[in-house]
Amino acid sequence: MDEMLKDFVIEALDLATNVEEHLLRLERDPDNKETLNAVFRSFHTIKGGAGFMGLPALVTACHLTENLFDALRTGAAPVTPSAIEASLQASGFVADQLNDLNNGTAPEQLAPMPADLERMLKDAIDGKDAPKAAAPAPAPVAAAPAPVPAAAPAPVAAAASADGLDWEAMYMAVVPPGTHTPAAAAATAATAAAQEATSAAAVPAAAAPAAAAPDAAQAKSGWDGVERRTENKPAQAAAAKADESIRIDAVKLDALLEVAGESVQAANQAAVLLERLSQFKFEGQAATLMATLTETLERASRYSAELQRATLATRMQPVGRLFQKFPRLVRELAKDLGKEVELTIEGAETEVDRVVVDSLYDPLVHMLRNALDHGVEGPEDRVANGKPAKAYILLKAWQEANSVMIVLQDDGRGMDPAKLRKKAMEKGLITEHQATSDDEAYQLVFLPGFSTKDVASSVSGRGVGMDVVKTAVEKNRGAIRIDSNLGKGTKFSIRLPIELSIVPTMLVSTSGAQLALPMAVVERVVELPETFMQVGGAPVLKDQGRPLPVRSLALSLGYEECSERVGIVINAPQPYIIAVEAVDGTADLVIKPMTALHVEGITGTARSAEGSLVLVVGLSFLMDGCRSSVRLAA
């Protein structure tokens, strides 16, 4: 894909995603003129770029939808459910075409516009499905909108089309000097005439690139040249803002981050070496050189840290980029299942590492599908149980210390721990002595092959979805927890590091190993006694008035037993104390994932300031209470 087409696809994908959000808002508020205008502008902008790139199917779909919204915003056609549905279908088709281009499909290999979609759009333009009391819709809407009192547009030159645009002038502005041949000029004049005469009809596939060629000026300037023509001052400000940003290949950005991390690591190691050198006595010129070296290394360390922070900031993206894809998914799935569901999104501005945003799409899709299929009830069942007919799902994100929390909560039927245990035993996934507590029973839904459905549907029931969720979360060094209240709903809570490459940690040592614990779950350090209270045969220590179980980090990781007399209070769903030999301080470590082998409880490796290898304990492992109830040696 050439650079120009690549830039168009990226810009257009953003517009297509926003279009779906606007359409769902319009469904709730049909009289919102601002939303109508926003959708019209988006399709018009995409059409301009598509015409310049020679994408006839995209031009046709956008042109018809643009005509529809021109009619809707001027009142020539009513906002009906069929109009919204047709627009959503058009938006989906546009998104599919753009995704195909993004995945490497050649423009000439793109699918044509479906005839059903074209018919739906034309029916909506004709006002079909409108309420009977409404005034009869006119014949297919002409390109010139109905006159709007109070805000008449500026006078249009004689050569301008019914769209209010001087097509010939725009063409001349786009085509490089020296190529304005008589044939090209004739083609431009013919295009303008055709545009004026047939604007209500779909652009024929063969003529689409030529018909939209005048919109090429938009492609040259962020694909919205028309808005810059009609709203000059805001557009100039937008253009100036656009000039302040550039697109960088993600691979290059990752390479830059790795270099920045290594430079910080090298600066830290240099500082340790310098501290050791300072123990020796230097005199004369050597003392002067040592002072200069100290100052230089301090400056290098400061600049490398600044470089690291700046590079990390470039990887941060709002989770709203991910969340905005879900309202339509929920709408369509609820419709298929015959349920009434409203999705509420909060905290879309919360920023997290780009890799996390990209990798959470599939897990959240699985969770939403399960919430709709398993979690929320149908309208009749909800009313019978004293609930509103419409179910509510909340998708929320916020920052908490060095983590990002993402919560998916519904007000559905909730989970029955007894039913979960029974199903897991029937499938041979657990024995009768396992998953005895409710929290452990909820975790059963993450087992491969587990499902409470006897027959798989097109939505769920094959026992693979929630396994994918847990795997994806743990791959990003995160943890997931379930809270449920039978008859009232279920809440999934995902905790993830804000960024993946550099993690604030507490350095500890135990049984001869150097380890790092994510600070996201470290609450405080306590001194452990030689003997403990015993509850159910397990060691327990009172901390701030609450009895907490004490677990050995060495035994939990399979190391040899040792004398562990330092405790770290872990802020998990069920708090506990983990025992280690010593706490060696804190450090922001550059984490490298373990790919060659899998070690239970270890998520990656890092280098300490002294240059020694450090094993990083997984956040999920700690949140799950070390996944074992290993007793601390007396």
Image: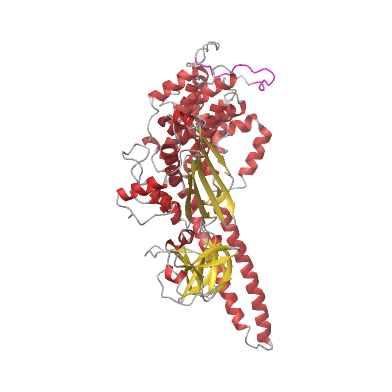
Percent position (x, y) of residue 632? Answer: 46, 71
Quadrant in which the N terminus appears: top left
Picture residue at 61% right of the left edge, 31% below the top:
227
Which residue is nearer to you in this view: 544 or 527? 544
Q: Is residue 250 visible?
A: yes
420 lies above or below 570: above
Percent position (x, y) of residue 69? Answer: 54, 24
Residue 141 falls within the magenta-colored stretch: yes
180 lies above or below 313: above
Picture residue at 55% right of the left edge, 12% below the top:
134
Percent position (x, y) of residue 242? Answer: 61, 43
Q: For residue 345, what is the image quadrant?
A: top right
Residue 468 falls within the magenta-colored stretch: no
252 lies above or below 265: above
Q: Is residue 504 visible?
A: no
Protein image colouring: secondary structure
Percent position (x, y) of residue 574? Answer: 51, 58
Q: For residue 630, what is the image quadrant?
A: bottom left
Total marks shown come to 0
User: Magenta-highlighted stretch: main secondary structure?
Assistant: loop
Magenta extent: 140-155
Q: Is residue 63 left or right of residue 35?
A: left
85 lies above or below 426: above
